[in-house]
Image (tube, grey):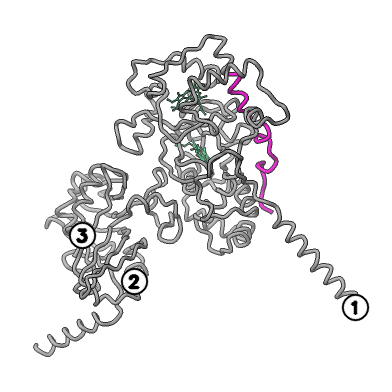
Amino acid sequence: MKSSSFLFICFLGFSILAFTLKKAIPHPFYQPKEWPKPTYNFKGNPLDYEKFELGRALFYDPILSRDSSISCASCHLQFTAFAHVDHKTSHGIDGRVGKRNAPGLANLAWRKLFHWDGGVLNLNAQAINPITHVDEMDMALDSLMYRLDRSPIYSAAFKRTFGTTDIRPFHLVKALAQFTLALISENSKYDKVKHGEDGIEFTEQEKKGLILFNNFCSSCHKPPFFASDDYKSNGLPIDPELLDFGRMTITGNKRDSLLFMVPTLRNIEYSFPYMHDGRISKLKDVIKHYTLLDYSNPLLSKELRKNPVKLSENEQKDLLAFLKTLTDKSFLFDERFKYSTMK
Amino acid sequence: MKVSFYLFFLSFGFSLNCYGQLSIIPTWNKKPLELQHVYLIHNKDSISFSTLKIYFSDFRFKDKISGRITSIDTLIFYDLADSSTHSFFNDLNLSNYECVAFTLGLDSSKNVSGELENAYDPLLGMYWAWNTGYINLKIMGESSAVPTNSHEFEFHLGGYRSPFATAQTIQIDLNDQYIYFDLEKLFSENIKLTKNHHILMPCKDAFLISQGLSACFK
């Protein structure tokens, strides 16, 4: 055999090997045991590791905002469970302040509704909101498609992953969903105790906290997500400046006035500030809020009205200790979800 | 006279027998509406249109002889500014059907499908991100009847949640391949530009105006 053709065959062999190795990397999404089936329609967007990497790069790339200053991660930071810290409500382009607090992002594949008012019905469509919202990224979709088409890196990446030379919004949002779907948090102390992993157990205080949680909180913040798709009032009065009526803005129904999403309590220790407008900054003050409810408030949801929250100072500490067992450090520091760019 | 009548009749019959496309024709004063053309309304005010975009869906054709219904449930996007959207259903023999019923707009399942491809593409300018819904009918333009400095009007009619669900079922006889949408009727009878010139979200006015749409189709 001629040495050049030997070299060629070696080269071919290596590139096939490299190709299959690359293909072999699994998409990080998985189905945790004992969890229900996801609601996300995976058929319309089959999991693909390369699309995940594209979505990840896009999530961290300010190219998605009008003046290339804001990325999704500007408001959704990994180490705070993909919530927006420091600010009560999120800051977008030109320092404009939005009306709402950016919630943490986790376990999105199991959700039926999104946003504090439930106005968004599926994860793909969700991403159009921040991109086009004037207070967030304020980017016209047609200009964004043009920008991505002209970027050598992204046009090549979309061609490779979606086989398209005409990037459309649905390609973009599917790529982003490949990333956000992968944000699964179920490796907290709570989960480990539940699965009897490594002989880990709750402390006495956490055990007492769990009982209190089951008495007063789990009717709305339902395990395993510590959230629910129902819209409820936990008694927060309206902010006279923001005038945010929550669910009613979507349904137009007076009965939905001041109802908001029941947010997940997973990683709650890190996703401060709290509530739809970030009005409470400390977790212990959230617990205090539940002990000071006004039970004559007709809007207060029945779970709380029928079962007033009574907690002594010590019990409040126990509950806080339990809430901290929902922190999942392996999620907050997962290398696969960190900042990355497209190569 | 007689000859021309027969010629007309022949061509009419011919157009019915070939595989014609269904075409939408917006009209003003019985003539095809043109964008940016200045029309007269109420015999005193000027009016012109810059945008006319419509969604149609759920077509049901009734067979002349058997009475059988043929359903085509794709979403059709119409844009007056883009002639490639003006006609559709190329391979349907329209002469077989007596009448057609269709939905102007999208029903709730289409609104919430999460589909963003083809006719659902947000780039078409019919997508409302904040409530994951679509505009059924978008009409924009200017009229001296609008009592603001800019004289602009903007109607984004849509919404699928009760009590303001706006999609309308429309039924028309199929005498030819055309569906006429009489905007003059809409703007003289349904929309009072002096009061109503900006509707940008689902609401009672969007609901009421939508209810009058069916009478504007022929």
Instruction: For mark 3, name the chain.
Output: B
Q: Under tag 1, what secondary structure? A: loop
Residue B189 can be seen, yes or no: yes
Residue at 72% across, 27% down: A199
Local crowd at mark 3 within 10 Å, few (<14), some, or many (≥20)?
many
Give the answer, above or below, for where A155 lies relative to B62.
Answer: above
Range of residues picked out in magenta: A320-343
Q: Label 2, on which residue?
A: B89
Residue B190 location, x and y as percent? 17, 51
Residue B66 in magenta stretch: no
* Most foreground residue, A201 or A319: A201
Q: Under tag 2, what secondary structure? A: loop
Quarter of the image containing the N terminus of chain A? Answer: bottom right
Query: What amino acid type is highlighted by mark number 1?
Result: Met
Q: CA distance from mark 2 to mark 3?
A: 24 Å
Residue at the limit of the structure toward the bottom, as seen here: B3
Which badge, 2 or 3, comes first in the chain's sequence? 2
Local crowd at mark 2 within 10 Å, few (<14), some, or many (≥20)?
some
Whether discs 2 and 3 lie on one chain: the answer is yes
Q: CA distance from mark 3 to mark 1?
A: 79 Å
Residue B206 location, x and y as percent? 25, 46
Q: Label 1, on which residue?
A: A1
* Most foreground residue, A94 or A203: A203
Instruction: For mark 1, name the chain.
Output: A
Q: Under tag 3, what secondary structure? A: helix
Q: CA distance from mark 2 to mark 1?
A: 61 Å
Residue at 29% across, 31% down: A254
